[in-house]
Image: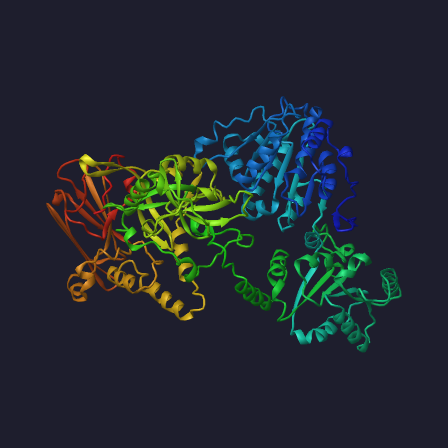
Amino acid sequence: FQSFQNVGKGENFVFLSKKIEPSSVLETAPLFDGLKKELAWNKFTGPTFTESYCWPPVAWGSDVVAISHQGNDPLLYIPPVLTLLHLESDYQALPNMSGVSLILCPGWKKAQLVFDLLKTYRKVCRRLHPVLVILGQNEEAASPMEIRGCEVVVTTPYNLLRLLKCNPGLLCRLCHLVLDETEVLFSDTAEQVFTILDCYKKATAQAQGNLPHQIIAVGTTWNKHMTPLVKEFMSDPYIVITAIEEAAIFGNVQQVVQPCMNSNRTAELLKILDFTQRSLQKVLVFTDSVTEVEMIHKALKSSSVVSLKKHKESKCNAACVLERWRRMHSSGTHAVLVLTDDCLQSLGITDATCVIHFSFPSPGVFGQRLQSMSDNFCTGIKDSAVDQEHMKAKSVILLTESSSCHAPGVLHYLKHAEAEIPEELYDLTARESEKNEKFSRPLCSSLKAFGICRNRTECPDRHQIYLSIDTAQNIADEMIETRERVTILPLLIVHATNYFGRIVRKQKDQYTVLAKEMNDYFKVPGHRISASTVKKSVFYGLCEGAICHRVQVVETSAKDEENVYKVTIEYIDEGRTSQVNSDQLLHLPAKFQSLPPQAVEIVVCRVKPIDNEVEWNPKVTDHINHRIKGKLHHAKVVHTLGKTIWVDPMVGVTNIPVMKMWINEYNIRSEILSTGLGTDNPEHVGEIQKLCRQMLVLDHAENLERDTAGLEEVSSPQDTSIQENSSESCNTSMFLDVFLLDNVVQTKEAEDPTVHQQKGHHPQIKWFQDNVTVTLKVQILRATDSKCEFSREKVTFSAYSEGKLYVADLELYESVIAEESTCVIKDTEAVILLVKEKKGAWYKLLKSKNVHVSLDFEHWDESEDGRPFTVG
């Protein structure tokens, strides 16, 4: 890595480890003729600048690293790899070409995209049979996976490791390994990728015959994992970097941030230009105004620092300045040039040793400024321990109180470059983030669905809760009769754990009544009156066949010649959106508008995609969509925020009116886990509640303190009376803890504190059963002085926990054998085992409803499907 080549042509830049003659036109590209014709037929406009440098070394069979702003484009490697596979003579040592190429993608979505792209070239590549390998965590999923006759395998690191367990010889025949989007692969799955690379290295060492072996790595950024990749697993690779900022990181450019007051920048600049090093420096001082260039040049002159200046009003042209710049350095003088950014391209300077950002750089000009030092970039892959400190190019940023505008972008880059970052830059970025908070954007869907957003830097949505935005529309209290069990009708499936639908009331559901009245009303032709004017946010009627809907206009477009135009509407009782013609919207009488919109967002908790994926695999979403859409479910609400409810569990049910009972058919969370493509997410609800604790109230700081205090009051799940009282005093409905009870179900203990002192607090209890026994789990921490008394139709439990007395006096619905029943005290709970007098399923546990007692759904799934869904 001694001879790096920097080629600058206009706005294009490339940094090469070895000389490459680019293939800039398709006709001369190193691809086989059939593929060229197919690309031309598909109106392919390339090769792009980066492709012109990447395709030749890939087609030669060499190891290649390509870093580019377009580094996530599979066309950087697919055409030349297909050309290699077309040369069958290279693989004569193999009995067939199955599995000779492997493309490793960062997730199922990118893998699917690459697979679909490969399929488009099967017509010209007769022997191309790609296979997409996406396996669940179920061990049996990998064993039947057949890759025989498939030359290209497309998969992800986790899936490949699962496949290798059943097919350990897969890598022995591998000739071409592609790492797609290396920055994501190494960020999320570095351990898995290096495990695969180790296995491949061992496999190639044992390979028999003269087989080609090639590793291709493409991405958008250079990171610390690239160095071991190149040094330990590649053989004399071609490194192609067309992103100047990444070339600067690769080239060990030293990034320095110097905080100072805006009024003190000139003095700080003079300190930096106090040349004490032996080696001569070639320094560029960048600013964004002609006035500052003149001011800096004058200050340097008065301090005896010889300098040049260049801006658009300079009398001296670019050639003159450039000649004087070179002459200064050759005569043994430090070369200093003060200039504006718009002069850099005409000068074409690439041999500076230091750039000083007198004006804070925007992301756009930052790279251009760094390019002026590209001749002095040194390799980040050191072959010796020689001190290269004085060989490094240096970038100095003057950070002032007025630099906040571009601070977030520069901070992101400096973190990526692993530079030393002063606290002042973090503070500026935080202030800028507050100023530019995405108030108009919705709360991040990933945060709601999984409790975390793994790509906050790029995510366009909000990651902060604001009271005035997120609780502007709340679920009406009457919609949730008891939070221990609500009936949900999912109507729109966004993905496997996120839906829109309605909460259906058990007694005389208001929407059912409204829907019937609307349908009857609009059956009369004279009632179908088209809306004379269509306005945004107004409610209208829409008839689809025999069904009438309430809709709200979200967006309107320009009218056509017939005064009809497209409008985007939202079905306010279902949650879905659609586009219709404006003349389809009907006048909606006021009596049909009084009932609030019924659509709510539903999120199933404690389950997420496997392998740290950020989206659900469509197989899971399709399965859940088919299973649950339009069917009634029972669920326990564990949290609410605005019109979003988080539920755990959510169970598909069937009503048996004759027996006055509901049959539990399936648990959605268990359904997802059974696919092998979902895994446990225990932190989900906790992360949502933590987010709510950090809620901001716009322009009302005093409300923030009140709401935070309200949350702390309900934080203890043991003291139910405190929770109930807190739920009354809290002005928002956003804090709904797992054990927080519905206000309509108030016990005497909650109303009268003296009763609490006599009877003690009631612990939370979960229960499940089999044919022989009933198990009660009493949730109590470190119980002391516990007592449990059994009788044929009653069980009484009492204990102290953290200085408080807890008492549960339970009258059983069926009879038990008292002498065979037991109670075991554990660290976090007491487990009571009741032995049934008669074998069989109990319809319910208690004679009368107890709001502190609920089903333990995790154990309920293990029993028979035909069990009734009851709470207490």
Q: Residue 830 versus residue 779: which sits nearer the camera? A: 779
Name the side, left or right, on which 384 lies relative to 318: left
Query: At which x and y percent is residue 858?
Result: 31, 43
Based on the displayed image, in which of its 4 quarters is residue 398 positioned? bottom right
Query: At which x and y percent is residue 860?
Result: 27, 41
The total number of labels drawn is 0
Query: At which x and y percent is residue 12?
Result: 75, 49
Residue lying farthest to the bottom in this orientation = 302
| Residue 28 vertical position relative to residue 606 in the rendered view, above or below | above
Q: Residue 772 versus residue 381: which sits nearer the camera? A: 772
- Which residue is drawn at the image coordinates 67% and 32% (left, top)? 42
Residue lying farthest to the top in this orientation = 95
Question: What's the colour scheme?
Answer: rainbow
| Residue 244 vertical position relative to residue 362 in the rendered view, above or below | above
Name the side, left or right, on which 839 lies relative to 482: left
Name the side, left or right, on which 452 lies relative to 300: left
Tell me if I can see residue 193 in this picture: yes
| Residue 721 vertical position relative to residue 23 in the rendered view, above or below | below
Q: Residue 563 versus residue 617: which sits nearer the camera? A: 563
Residue lying farthest to the front in this orientation = 526
Based on the displayed image, in which of its 4 quarters is residue 198 positioned? top right
Tell me if I can see residue 668 in this picture: no
Residue lying farthest to the left in this orientation = 792
Query: At which x and y percent is residue 574?
Result: 38, 44
Q: Residue 758 versus residue 730: which sits nearer the camera? A: 730
